[in-house]
Amino acid sequence: MSKTDLVAPLSVATDDLTLTVAGVTMPVRSTGDRLFVEVPTLRSAVRVARAVNAVPSGPTRLLTVTDLTTELRVRGRTVAVFGAHTRPGPLARELGIAPAEFRLGGALAAASSGATAAVDHLLTWLR
C-alpha cells in the first residue's frame, strides 16, 4: 500500500449535527475526513479556538491522531484549522489558539462580509 492509498483511521458523517463550545452553538457538516464548523462571528471563533486548545490532550490531539481536520468558518470563510495538516504561525500563537492554524485571509474576508451585511441591513432599515 502506498502513502497515497492510506485513508484516515476515523471518518465522520453528519446530516444534522450541532456543536456547542464555550457557549457558542455551531452547525457542523462533514466530508468524511474534514469537519466544517460554522461559527457566527470572528470573536466567537477565537473564543471557541481558545477553549478547544485549553484542554491539553483534548480535541486537537484527537483530531491529529485520527487524521481528521476541522475548519472553523465564519460567513463561509475558513478562519482557523485544527487537527491534522495544520501549520500554526506566529499570529495563531499571539491569539492564543496554537496549535490551530489561523487563516488571516479568511478572517479578513469574513470581517468584510460581516461589515457589508451590517451596512446593507442598516440601509434596508433606513428605507
Image (tube, rainbow, N blue to C red):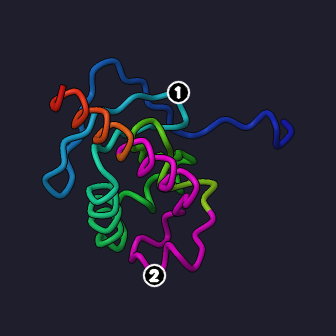
Q: Residues within 10 Å of mark 2 (few under 14, many from 20)?
A: few
Farthest-out residue, right: 2
Residue sitting at x 79%, y 33%? 5
Disc 1 marks which amino acid? Thr
The image quadrant where one finds the C terminus is top left
Write down the region rendered in magenta: 87-114
Residue 52: image x %, image y %?
32, 62
Secondary structure beneath disc 1?
loop
Say which of 62 and 77 sits in front: 77
Give the labeled residue for mark 2.
Answer: 94
Residue 71: image x %, image y %?
47, 46
Say which of 49 and 113 sits in front: 113
Q: Residues within 10 Å of mark 1 (few under 14, many from 20)?
A: few
> In screen coordinates, is 7 left or right of 117?
right
Give the labeled residue for mark 1.
Answer: 31
Residue 87: image x %, image y %?
63, 65
Secondary structure beneath disc 2?
helix
